[in-house]
């Protein structure tokens, strides 16, 4: 199990990778999908936004 700092580092690294690859100007949903993909590739378990009922 990863500690908090290890998870934070993975999220930060993935965020930087997505921002560098995509740049500014896209819809939030595009960044969200790419970030979720990158985080899953590192082994993190990721849930994206869920609809509220």
Image: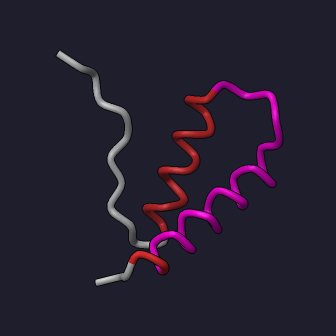
| Residue 53 against residue 42 in the figure, above or below | above
Q: Is residue 26 above or below residue 21?
A: above
Quarter residue 12 falls in: bottom right
Please say whether residue 18 is one of the residues in the magenta stretch: yes
Residue at position x 73%, y 28% from top?
A: 26
Q: Residue furthest left?
A: 53
Please state which of residues 9 and 26 is positioned toward the viewer in this rendering.
Answer: 9
* Side (left or right) of 4 relative to 35: left
Measured as percent of width and height from the top left, residue 49 is found at 36, 33
Q: Is residue 15 left or right of residue 43?
A: right
- Depth check, front residue: 35 or 12: 12
Question: In the image, what residue occupies the spot 80% across and 28% down?
Answer: 25
Q: Residue at x 32, y 47 (%)?
A: 47
Instruction: Give the residues in magenta.
Output: 6-27
In magenta segment, residue 24: yes
At a point 32% along the width and 61% down the height, the residue shown is 45
**Residue 50 screen position, x and y as percent:** 29, 30
Question: Secondary structure of the magenta portion, mostly?
Answer: helix
Q: Farthest residue in the top direction?
A: 53
């Amino acid at each position: 199990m990863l500690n908090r700092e290890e998870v934070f580092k993975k999220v930060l690294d993935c965020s930087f990778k997505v921002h560098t690859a995509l740049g500014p100007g896209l819809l939030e949903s595009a960044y969200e999908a790419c970030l979720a993909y990158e985080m899953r590739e590192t082994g993190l378990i990721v849930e994206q936004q869920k609809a509220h009922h």
